[in-house]
Every structure is written in structure tokens, then in C-alpha cells.
Image (cartoon, rainbow, N blue to C red):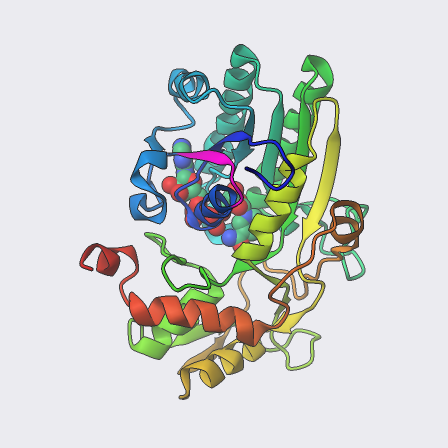
Amino acid sequence: MATGGRTMRFLMTGGAGYVGSACLRWLLKQGHEAYAFDDLSEGNAAAVPPDRLIQGSIHDRGAIEAALRDQRIDSVMHFAAVASVPDSIADPDTYWQVNLMGTKNVLDAMRACGVRTLLFSSTAATYSFDNPMPLTEASKLEPQVPYGTTKLAAERLIADYARAYDMGYTFLRYFNASGADPDGEFGEDRRSESHLIPLVLYAATGRRDEIKIFGGDWETRDGTCVRDYVHTDDLAQAHQLAAESLEPGMGRVFNVGNGQGTTVLEVVRGCEEVVGRPIPHQIVEPRPGDPGILIASPARLREELGWVPRFENIRDIVATAWEWSNRYPHGYESKHGD
Ligand SMILES: NC(=O)c1ccc[n+]([C@@H]2O[C@H](COP(=O)([O-])OP(=O)(O)OC[C@H]3O[C@@H](n4cnc5c(N)ncnc54)[C@H](O)[C@@H]3O)[C@@H](O)[C@H]2O)c1
């Protein structure tokens, strides 16, 4: 039985991806029913139980409708997206197709099937670079890169649908999702990795030569960028709390971050401590589209939903990622060889 007393049935687009699969496993542990709907373009079949995976694309509205009906879904969590800042600058066409038009397909399928609540994976990249830190949900929205623009456009589309068609939504604006399953069985493993912690650990294990740090002259403690790292289990808890309290007619927004800033060099040092040896790194030119500092205020999430994160320091987060990387040095591919 689910903790709130009512077992819910969720469809999770992108549910075989890094964050989606962590949320799916978490919801199953809490007694809910959850199914991943994923085209496996980035995700991994092995990240979710085999009977929980529906392979399909959010570009295929008929397939989404079939999944909603076949599994008698109560509510949707929409994770499926393309999510790399540099790729979005190089190829905005794909970003608008997947992140906006894909979201419209999900909403249209929900309408057709009478599913009226949606949790949407939004991002800190929707905020302006000019805001004071930490960012609250009232901070100015002004995305600077197509990734953020497409996510904000999807938020606006969802809000329009909700108003017109009596749906309810929650936007969870994540900061930097990080870490791995605390039991070391599941973790971060994409076809094309661009996230800091897995890349640092690749450099630690020789899977790549070194880690490049983009910019060393930011106005921060040590000149490198500051980000807010939130463990996937803590993100999953936020999804559970938000989903169990979501009703048609609601429109809510929550930042999901720890409220603490960590510099890139501090992440590298944290990884070195956990791994027990130096990790080769080099400071290079800053990357277009990167802000210097991003820190969340998670006050609303704590106060309104009672969210209590378990992983508040970077070393603990990195330790879970290292455990996974140590056990499965080639990610899910090595897991298949178990
Ligand atoms: N990872 C982060 O730090 C972070 C931060 C802010 C927001 N987000 C958002 O969270 C969500 C999940 O991110 P993630 O890090 O788990 O990424 P991910 O790439 O691991 O997961 C995305 C999943 O979507 C699937 N997908 C992509 N296109 C699809 C399509 N057309 N049809 C069906 N499935 C499709 C991929 O196969 C993948 O499994 C994304 O919406 C992302 O924008 C992530």
C-alpha cells in the first residue's frame, strides 16, 4: 500500500532514463504502480524491471494513448526530453520537436484518455542569469539557451492546457541531479554523457584521459562554476510527495535543489577523496550558455510538501556514484554481464 494510503498508477515518459528510472524504482518501493514509457534513445532497459518498460516514443500519440489505457493510468510524470545545453545550441530543431511537440503529444493523449494530472521535469535553466541567489520560484524567468527556452515553453503549454481542460500540474525545476542508487545497483549511464560527476569518475577510472573544467575566472570561491547538486533519491521523494498531493485544477511550481552551492573544483576534490587518488583535470575556456552560479532555494518544497533530503553533502552524493561506477565500470553494459 502506498504511504499516502492510496495506490496510484503512473506512466513515466523517459522512465528508463537516469532520473526517471530512480523515481520509478522509488515509487514501486512506496507501493505505487509505475510504468516507464521510453524510446531508449538515451535510457537503459536494465534500469527498470522488465515488466515495467513500455518501449515507445512520445512522438507517437497512439502509443502513449494505448499505454495510458492498457495500464489504467491515474497520473503522468513527464521526464522524456533532450537535455544537453551545448547540443540545444547546435540543434534547436530537435529540442523544439522533442521538448515542446513531444510534450504536446503527451498532453493530447492525456486529454483523449481522461488523465488529468501531470508532473513535469523542468529545470533551473528556465531562470534568468541576472537573479540574486538562491533562486526561488518567483525569480525572473528568462532562459538563455534553447534547452531552457523549450522547457519554459513546455511549462507554458502545460499551464494553458490545464486552465482550458481542467487538468492539474506540478513543475519540478531540478537543479543538478546527481548520485546513484545507494545500494550501488543503478546509476547514471547515457549514450552521450555530459554531466560532471560521471565524467570526473570516468577520468578517475581511465575511461577518459582527464576532466575539462569550463572556466576558472568566475566570481566564485575558487573561480570555477557553482552548482546545486541534489541526489536522485531526494528528487524521487519530491516526485512522490508532489504526485500524491496533486489534483486537477492545481498549478504548482517547486525548485528541487539542496540549497547549497558547490564549485566544480570542490566536486573534483570530493571525488578524489572518495576514490582515494588524484583525478587529472584541466581548466579550459568557459562554455557558451553556462551561468557562473546556480543555487536553489528549496524552502517551498520543504514547507509545502515536507520534503527532507537525505543527501546534503557532495561527498555522500559522490560516494553513491562511485559505488555504482566501481561495481559497473561500463554502466548497464557491464551489468548485463553479471
Ligand atoms: N539530469 C539533470 O541534472 C536534470 C536537471 C534539470 C532537469 N532535468 C530534466 O529531467 C528529465 C530527465 O533527465 P535525465 O537526466 O534523466 O535525462 P536522461 O537522458 O537520462 O533521460 C531522458 C529519457 O527520455 C528518453 N527519451 C528521449 N526522447 C524520447 C522520446 N521521443 N520518446 C520517449 N522517450 C524519450 C530517453 O531515452 C531517456 O531515457 C529531463 O526532462 C531533463 O530535462 C534533468
Residue at the image position 56 percent from the left and 32 percent from the top? 7
Q: How many marks?
A: 0
The quarter of the displayed image where residue 257 is located: bottom right
The x, y position of residue 225, in whole percent, is 61, 70
The quarter of the displayed image where residue 194 is located: bottom left
Q: Is residue 143 left or right of residue 192?
A: right
Query: Viewer-proximal residue, 146 or 300?
Result: 300
Taking the view exactly as shown, the residue that stands out farthest to the top is 112
Residue 232's place in the image compared with 29, above or below, is: below
Q: Is residue 312 left or right of residue 206?
A: right
The quarter of the displayed image where residue 76 is located: top right
Residue at the image position 64 percent from the left and 26 percent from the top? 158
Residue at the image position 20 percent from the left and 60 percent from the top? 338
Location of the N terminus by quadrant is top right
The x, y position of residue 249, in whole percent, is 74, 22
Residue at the image position 77 percent from the left and 56 percent from the top? 130
**Can residue 103 be seen by looking at this rendering?**
yes
Residue 83's place in the image compared with 155, above or below, is: below
The x, y position of residue 80, in whole percent, is 47, 37
Query: Viewer-proximal residue, 250 or 265?
Result: 250
Q: Magenta span covers which residues?
A: 30-36
The x, y position of residue 294, in whole percent, is 68, 61
Magenta stretch containing residue 31, yes or no? yes
Magenta stretch containing residue 321, yes or no? no
Residue 316's place in the image compared with 160, above or below, is: below
